[in-house]
Amino acid sequence: MKEWRNETPPEFEINLDLLKGHYLIEYQDSTTATIRHFPKSCLPPSAKERLEHLFQIRRKWVREDLLPYVDDLAEDDKKLELLLLKFGRTSREAGVTYYSRRA
């Protein structure tokens, strides 16, 4: 983020929300994170293949991280949720809902 801010004119906003669907944050520990280029455009177009690929990249996804990569697979939130449950499963840990590969 520091490099991005240093390379961007001060009148422009920098915000990771602007890049949703183009990056993943990988946490090495509680204080260190790496932003990795991961464009949605490189994912398979079919729901089944795309979710299989995403679950290979990460074993568990929180909804806010997964949505930018699957939001175009269904026309509304209800149908998207059904699709996620068809090809994956949900679990809850410490009040957080995760999506993972169906066993």
Image (spheres, grey):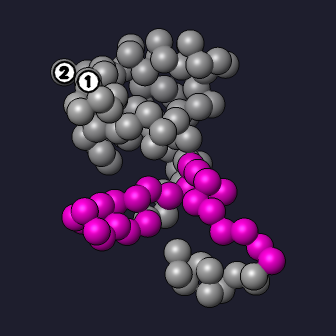
Q: Residue 38, percent across and down?
A: 48, 57
Q: Secondary structure at mark 1?
A: strand
99 left or right, relative to 40: left
Q: In terms of depth relative to the viewer, which is nearer, 101 or 63?
A: 63
Q: Nearer the viewer, mark 1 or mark 2?
A: 1
Q: Residue 61, percent across and down?
A: 35, 38
Q: Residue 101, percent across and down?
A: 27, 28
For label 1, the residue is 91
Residue in view at x 63 percent, y 62 percent: 15
Mark seen at residue 22:
none
Q: Residue furthest bottom?
A: 6
Q: Earlier in the sequence, mark 1 or mark 2?
A: 1
Q: Local crowd at mark 2 within 10 Å, few (<14), some, or many (≥20)?
A: few
Q: Amino acid at mark 1?
A: Ser
Q: Secondary structure at mark 2?
A: loop
* Residue 8 position by quadrant: bottom right
* Residue 27 position by quadrant: bottom left
61 left or right, relative to 46: left
> Looking at the image, is 64 positioned above or below residue 103?
below
As for residue 27 lying within the magenta part, the answer is yes
Q: Local crowd at mark 1 within 10 Å, few (<14), some, or many (≥20)?
A: few
As for residue 103 lying within the magenta part, the answer is no
Q: How many marks?
A: 2
Residue in view at x 62 percent, y 87 percent: 6
For label 2, the residue is 103
> Looking at the image, is 3 positioned above or below residue 89?
below
Q: In terms of depth relative to the viewer, which is nearer, 23 or 15?
A: 15
> Looking at the image, is 41 positioned above or below residue 52?
below
Note whether residue 48 is visible.
yes
Q: Amino acid at mark 2?
A: Ala
Is the C-beta separation of discs 1 and 2 under 8 Å? no
Find the magenta span and give its range.
Answer: 11-35
